């Protein structure tokens, strides 16, 4: 009797768990399904001007993908290149910073850690306004204005993204076994060779995770980019925001679907190169 009651209760909990996760995934994925479905939707009458999302689609079509404005494709390329540059630069800055914070012994270490992680606590819109004012002051002093330039946008995103690399690498370093380095040096390896052949390969998942977060932060940012971008340096989220705000049509859904597909490919590449299990363990 007890065994049957226990199995019945266990089955009920499993059913409840499955229902809970189905609900969570439905809430998370339903907007994406609507956007992608709407990007393939064609009106029943070709003379109808579509100014809203049609879901489920009345007819399937690829016409909206052919009508994606060149400005959105250009902005998508800008966001992609900018995200890669930010991820690389944030890694070059974040890895030495994490090594110094975890292994360094100096006065003000706690204060330095707080300063380096401060961008995580500042609203992005405040960062955008601050950088805009900074660039104006810098331009007035040097006659070199950074607002509206790729360099200015890059520096703003680098400020936002670097703490993610520092945090990710620091977490891995805190679990790092120093005996591995001691063994390498005991066998004759120099400190630099030990760093390149032992330390960096062990903490590579943390570096990759931080770089991936840095890329995502740069790619999806709107509050900073809307203040610092110009017509030639507009990022994809800002361009899409303006398109939805001014003159909506399903071509915006098509470009958003392309960006979503790119995100899926990025996750698949991360899984193939490193493994999501490794990424999750590095957090």
Image (tube, rainbow, N blue to C red):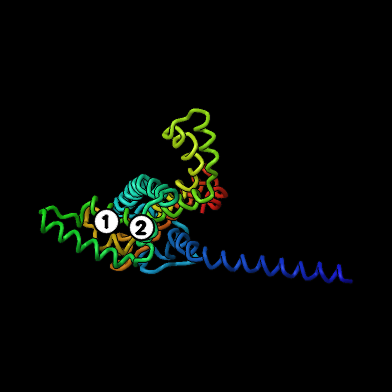
Give the labeled residue for mark 1: 234
Give the labeled residue for mark 2: 108
Going from the N terminus, do you reach mark 1 or mark 2 first? 2
User: In the picture provided, is 268 more to the left or to the right than 65?
Assistant: right
Regarding residue 236, the answer to whether it shows in the image is yes
User: In the picture provided, is 127 more to the left or to the right than 52?
Assistant: left
Closer to the camera in the image, 134 or 186: 186
> Where, quadrant-wise, is the N terminus in this rendering?
bottom right
Residue 256, horizontal then vertical, whole percent: 40, 58
In the image, which is nearer the foreground, mark 1 or mark 2?
A: 2
Regarding residue 64, the answer to whether it shows in the image is no
Residue 124, horizontal then vertical, whole percent: 33, 65
At 34% from the left edge and 46% from the top edge, which residue is drawn?
89
Classify residue 252 by image quadrant. Answer: bottom left
At 34% from the left edge and 55% from the top edge, which residue is drawn?
67
User: In the picture provided, is 133 more to the left or to the right than 29?
Assistant: left
Residue lying furthest top: 188
Residue 95, horizontal then vertical, whole percent: 40, 46
Closer to the camera in the image, 85 or 203: 203
| Label 1 crowd bin: few (<14), some (14–19), many (20+), radius 10 Å | many
Residue 204, above or below 243: above
């Amino acid at each position: 009797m007890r065994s049957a009651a226990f199995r019945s209760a266990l089955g009920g909990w499993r059913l409840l768990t499955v229902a809970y996760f189905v609900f969570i995934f439905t809430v998370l994925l339903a907007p994406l399904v609507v956007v992608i479905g709407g990007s393939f939707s064609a009106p029943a009458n070709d003379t109808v001007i579509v100014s809203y999302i049609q879901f489920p689609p009345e007819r399937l079509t690829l016409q909206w993908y052919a009508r994606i404005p060149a400005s959105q494709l250009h902005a998508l390329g800008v966001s992609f290149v900018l995200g890669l540059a930010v991820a690389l630069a944030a890694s070059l800055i974040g890895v030495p910073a994490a090594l110094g914070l975890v292994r360094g012994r100096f006065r003000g270490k706690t204060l330095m850690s707080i300063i380096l992680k401060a961008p995580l606590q500042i609203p992005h819109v405040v960062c955008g306004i601050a950088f805009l004012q900074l660039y104006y002051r810098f331009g007035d002093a040097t006659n070199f204005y950074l607002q509206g330039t790729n360099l200015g946008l890059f520096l703003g995103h680098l400020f936002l993204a670097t703490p993610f690399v520092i945090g990710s690498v620091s977490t891995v370093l805190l679990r790092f076994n120093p005996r591995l380095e001691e063994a390498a040096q005991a066998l004759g390896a120099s400190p630099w060779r030990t760093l390149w052949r032992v330390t960096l390969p062990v903490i590579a998942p943390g570096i990759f995770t931080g770089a991936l977060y840095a890329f995502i932060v740069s790619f999806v940012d709107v509050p900073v980019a809307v203040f610092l971008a110009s017509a030639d340096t507009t990022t994809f989220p800002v361009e899409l925001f303006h398109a939805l705000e001014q003159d909506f049509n399903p071509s915006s859904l098509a470009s958003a679907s392309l960006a979503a597909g790119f995100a899926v490919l990025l996750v698949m590449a991360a899984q193939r190169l490193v493994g999501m299990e490794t990424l999750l363990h590095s957090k």
